[in-house]
Image (spheres, helix red, strand yellow):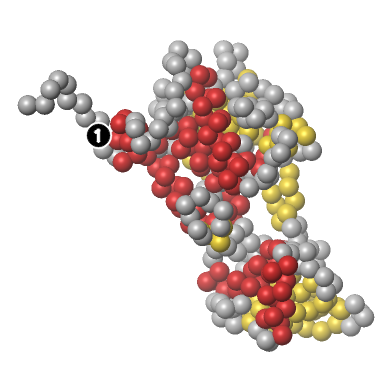
Amino acid sequence: MTDSKLKGDFDKNAPPGNPPPTVIKTDAIIIGAGPVGLFAVLELGMQDIQAHIVDVLDKPGGQCAELYPDKPIYDIPALPGVTGQELVDKLMAQVAPFNPVFHLGEMADNLEELPTGGWRLTTNTGTVLEAPVVVIAAGCGAFTPKKPSIPHIADYEGTSVFYSVRDKNSFKGKKVLIAGGGDSALDWALELEPVADKVNLIHRRDDFRGAPDSVNEMRRLVEDGKINLHIAEIVKLNGKDGKLESVTVQDQKGQTRDIECDVLLPFYGLNMKLGPLAKWGLNLDDNQVAVDTAKFQTSSPGIFAIGDINTYPGKRRIILSGFHEAALMAHAAFPLVYPNKKPSTQHSTASRPLHDKITGKEKKAEPRGPKP
């Protein structure tokens, strides 16, 4: 098929009158570079289907890399324990032989059906892609952190206030204040306690929504004096030039006091939005894309949805389910890319061409006739 390495090299800021942007033709367009989107590259590649991947984030990995890169995952087959970033790194190594092309820091904006068949996707930066297959693997859609309504918090964002943890070692020796009562707040309080100089956890009430084991472990560390727990709300940030020195908190009795800290990590959840996807004319069910369970195809032929973005009876929003969906999707996509070929199931242990591709060996002709 087409060369998946081809990229448009046009000037997106060129004045009117210049030639239109280069159209990149490929076999499949994957929207979302999280674990399920990356695994789709592998499954499509095993069907000799080349893929381009579009993701609004500036690196592959989706929520695994953005929200919990250092947190362990225990339900991936053959991996007794792996962090979010380690899983992403392993998937990137696994798909490397299939040469996917990434368009990072770009949002999938407009999707239109071509008169001759197939689909044209335009990103918010002007990249134009065409393919007979589109795979939506956008997780929960575009997600943004819920920001607390604390005056002047924007002045500290990116220097002292962070809504995710990319490298827990960057907080070594810091006085960290974690705000929230859910799993993220509890998990990071436990993860950062051995790393930070001091961990303070603040929640408006002494009732936590996280996993019971995490709550119990947090309370044990509070009793041991390793974590300070505050039942209060943040009302003011104190510092200068973007560097936090302390926060002022108010308890349930209305009394205020200051807590010394270098870093504030507010974990109040995420706002999930479908973004431009909502206007693509797909059948939706409670902001999720409805699919069939034979092909994981949407209401529009040629457009598939896998992972947390889709819904069907019995759906489970876990990575493992997304991997299963990617495998069936890839087989369903084959006749759209190769209408004149008979589909077949590729077994990686038995297919010599596939084995050579994955291992990087050049294809060699098999000897014919009896051995000398």
Q: Say whether residue 131 is visible.
A: no
User: Residue 340: image x %, image y %?
Assistant: 45, 12
Give left or right: position of 60 versus 269: left
Which of these two is toward me, 304 or 221?
221
Residue ID at (34%, 32%): 350
Alpha-carbon neighbours of circle 1 within 10 Å: few (<14), some, or many (≥20)? Answer: few
* Residue 193 position (above or below residue 362): below
User: Residue 64: image x %, image y %?
Assistant: 58, 54
Give the quadrant of the N terminus: top left
Q: Which residue is mark 1?
A: 362
Which residue extends farthest right?
Answer: 253
Give the quadrant of the C terminus: top left
* Residue 42 position (above or below residue 131): below
Residue ID at (82%, 77%): 231
Secondary structure beneath label 1: loop
Q: Say whether residue 293 is visible.
A: yes
* Residue 240 position (above or below residue 184): below
